[in-house]
Image (spheres, rainbow, N blue to C red):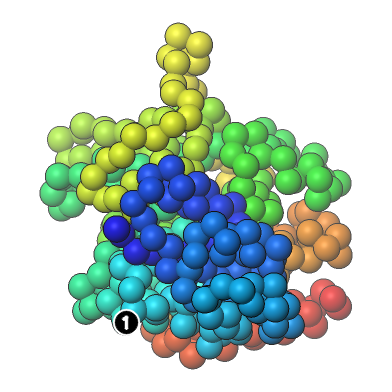
Amino acid sequence: MKQIAILGSTGSIGTQTLEVVRANGDIQVVSLAAGSNIVRLEEQIREFSPKVVCVWQEEQARELKRRVADLPVKIVSGMEGLLEAATVPEAEIVVTAVVGMIGIRPTMAAMEAGKDIALANKETLVTAGHLIMPLARKRNVRILPVDSEHSAIFQCLNGEDKRRVSRILLTASGGPFRGRTREQMRHIGVEDALKHPNWAMGRKITIDSSTMVNKGLEVMEARWLFEVGLESIQVVVQPQSIIHSMVEFVDGAVMAQLGTPDMKLPIQYALYYPGRRPLGGGRLDFAVLSQITFEAPDTVNFPGLALAYRVGKQGGTAPTVYNAANEMAVRLFLEKKIGYLEITDIIEAAVEEIPFREDPGLEEILETEQMTYEFIKGRWKV
Ligand code: NDP
Ligand code: MG
């Protein structure tokens, strides 16, 4: 029995991870964590019998405790509880599927406790990659990518010498607004932006995909995971989302991983790496598919991608400012407090205004996050 912890178990990645657990029957879930969805947590507790469950909101934690009083499960809350769920002694792998920078501390705590990380929570690597990667080496733990593009790259690199990689070709769908000008995107509403052409995901990443900020975050995620320079990472738009990413080697060979858009494949691959398990679901039918097309990304109308390369090159706290500004801007957009184009306007303004710090520690990263939120609240009067 493999024992795992799932942080963010009620979300899109979290519930699909539990589907993988259910289908395989040889994984034991020892802890779960979520923000506030106690209805779904109760169902998960009754089905998977974890030992520890964290609910971020204290009030909801108390309510959940009452609901599952008949079961031998420990309910905890807040950051202390999240750290406990991330470090339960039995867990070998921690699936980080919380959304946002809230994932940094539990991810690092799990690594300190010697656990492998199945990483979906890209915001953690974007903002603290310079702390996470050395920590992985020091504690001898693995960071197994769950993000589909990074899983594809990871699969292409299997058995290869990393020093023989010349380029990483990170594919992007281009999102629902591919081909539009900024002017044509001015009046986009929340409902329009929540419709992704190929993937069903959580709300924040769906908006990020539509602005191409998700691809910007993924460029920075790839840079840490595969330890390559940003200049060696090229984004290729592949609107059908069939090629999940590619790697070019020094002899010109290009390896790609293809498949239907289904996150259960990268999740399962991370949980059983280096093995492969059967997985149900659709298969590619090349006769029906008939074509796979490619384009260069539009960095003029989608400035979030070019800006990601800029902050990535700058390093230090710049990626934290980019990421934190995006987290807040997306929240404000979802609350209908700002317009669609203001998401990238806010990121640009924050990157210009927030003081830069080189080589930040964890506390400085979290301070920069707060500083970014304060700046946006002041400037946008929200
Ligand atoms: P969702 O919004 O669907 O789920 C987020 C999860 O995090 C929920 O379980 C939520 O709980 C939980 N959560 C939120 N705040 C807290 C908190 N303070 N403490 C503990 N748990 C919390 O997001 P996704 O599953 O879509 O994405 C998760 C991560 O995976 C993101 O970083 C995303 O970028 C990445 N990712 C997602 C992909 C996808 O297909 N969805 C693909 C690739 C990467 P609650 O439900 O109670 O609010
Ligand atoms: Mg992705």
> Residue 50 placed where, x, y %?
48, 68
Question: Which residue occupies 78% across, 66% down?
Answer: 332
Question: Which residue occupies 50% across, 11% down?
Answer: 288
> Which image quarter is the C terminus in?
bottom right
Is 313 positioned to the left or the right of 112 in the image?
Answer: right
State the residue position of label 1: 112
Q: Compared to 141, does 109 lie above or below? A: below
Q: Compared to 229, does 287 lie above or below? A: above
> Residue 173 or 321: which is nearer the viewer?
173
> Residue 199 or 174: which is nearer the viewer?
199
Residue type highlighted by circle 1: Glu
> Residue 120 or 299: which is nearer the viewer?
120
> Residue 298 placed where, x, y %?
58, 41
| Secondary structure category for the residue under label 1 | helix
> Residue 290 placed where, x, y %?
48, 12
* Tag count: 1
> Which image quarter is the N terminus in?
bottom left
Name the residue at the top extreme: 287
> Residue 256 placed where, x, y %?
32, 33
Question: Which residue occupies 69% across, 68% down?
Answer: 38
* Residue neighbourhood size for the residue with mark 1, other residues' Cα within 10 Å, grouped as few (<14), some (14–19), many (≥20): some
Is 339 positioned to the left or the right of 358 in the image?
Answer: right
Question: Which residue occupies 56% across, 73% down?
Answer: 71
